[in-house]
Image (cartoon, rainbow, N blue to C red):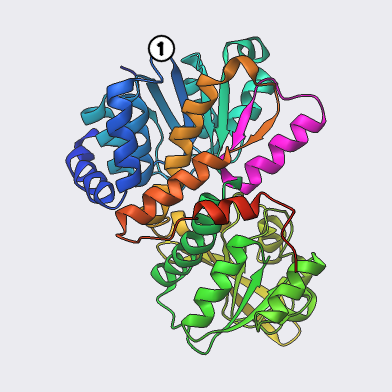
Amino acid sequence: MQYDIADISLAELGRQRIAWADVNMPVLASIRARFAKERPLEGHTVAACMHITTETANLLRALKAGGATVIACASNPLSTQDDVAASLVKHEGISVYAIRGEDAKSYYSHIDAALDARPTITMDDGCDLVTRLHKDRPSQIAEVVAGTEETTTGVIRLKAMEADGALGYPIVAVNDADTKHMFDNRYGTGQSTLDGVIRATNVLLAGKVIVVAGYGYCGKGVASRARGLGAQVIVTEINPLRALEAVMDGFRVEPMDDAASEGDIFITVTGDRDVLIREHFLRMKDGAILANSGHFDIEIDLQALGELASGERRRQVRPMVEEYLVPQAGGDARIMVIAEGRLVNLGAAEGHPANVMDMSFANQALAAEWAVLNRASLEPKVYDVPDDIDQGIAALKLDTMGVKIDELTEKQKEYLSSWHTGT
């Protein structure tokens, strides 16, 4: 078995942490048990480009239990947990190509190593694996049955590929399942983002002005949790409906040009680039903290920030915090960037809690099974997760939580499918 990880001696620690997460992922555990009996992925090779965390490890274990050969690589240079990578190699027999802090060259060489395994199923977290396959290895596309995508950013890229006629095989947008974006994006990102900010800086959030850029599900989660910890929250948006929703939820809504001079902490969660730019840095308070929880590190224009703080005016002040000295009219302002502008919840913390990822990764496993079973009728386009899978995962999650709900009576079902009864 081939692999490229940081330190195989970390495997036992990784196994302990994977087991801890497994306890909090009962839905995925039930799927793994069924997969072990039915082997729905027998004969398939899965290349998974994902954050190599304890939660991801349990997804990979489920896929292997289902009969698949599994190869994993990192979907972000700072999101790999090296002990988890070691345990996957040593204890699960899964080839892993991921090292925390790897440079861009290593990052893409690891993606290439996963593609060298000739996958029949791809699992992506941001679409880098799929893009690499389509751009550099078009001859392999015909070998792939289907894929899945975990993130908003990745789905945006995939839909652009579909619109251009460039997508070569069907991919299920796991991100768009209700049991993913309503819970993972809102509750997971909301909690884990602030966890990353607190771990990296040890600042008190109560009383701070936190600027949240973007009010999608992730932004809603961050804004809600920040307010819950006593922060004053300003939301910036480009979508009128989302901006209106933020106002109605009780948040201040302003353009970033105005919020730049007010914020103590800035958190970007837009999925777009250049959200914080040179003009904003020149207006920020001394000591402003910048964090990104969007998938890629282009939400903050770090090149422009580096140009403003050139030479010896940039230094590391804490393990995951860099200080940039930016010249302003009233003197230098210290601007702090967490985790190199990469995903703060994974770069400076441990990512989403296992309880949330239980539903997201249940979607991944079941979407892969669905795609294999239905491959003959699928076209090369982006598919939603089937509603029965989504609803089934929600029902399983409620069951594991000991929560019971009502069921429709036959009369109620008849009424909902009829047009005869009126006022």
Q: In the image, 76: left or right of 275? A: left
Residue 214 lies in quadrant: bottom right
Q: Residue at x 63, y 26 (%)?
A: 132
Q: Residue at x 39, y 38 (%)?
A: 99
> Which residue is more in the foreground, 410 or 211?
410
Was residue 77 drawn as part of the magenta stretch in this picture?
A: no
Residue range highlighted in magenta: 152-175
Crowd rating for badge 1 (residues with CA inside 10 Å; few <14, some 14–19, many 20+):
few
Type of amino acid under label 1: Gly
Was residue 153 drawn as part of the magenta stretch in this picture?
A: yes
The quarter of the picture where the N terminus appears is: top left
Q: Secondary structure at mark 1?
A: loop
Q: In the image, 153: left or right of 412? A: right
Q: In the image, 352: left or right of 1? A: right
Give the answer, above or below, for where 4 lies relative to 185.
Answer: above
Point out residue 285 in the picture as x, y percentages from the top left corner.
Answer: 65, 83
Q: Residue at x 50, y 61 (%)?
A: 189
Q: Residue at x 28, y 50 (%)?
A: 21
**Residue 165 makes an appearance in the image:** yes
> Which residue is more in the foreground, 128 or 372?
372
> Which residue is more in the foreground, 202 or 223?
223
Point out residue 117 in the picture as x, y percentages from the top left corner.
Answer: 46, 15
> Which residue is more in the foreground, 392 or 80?
392
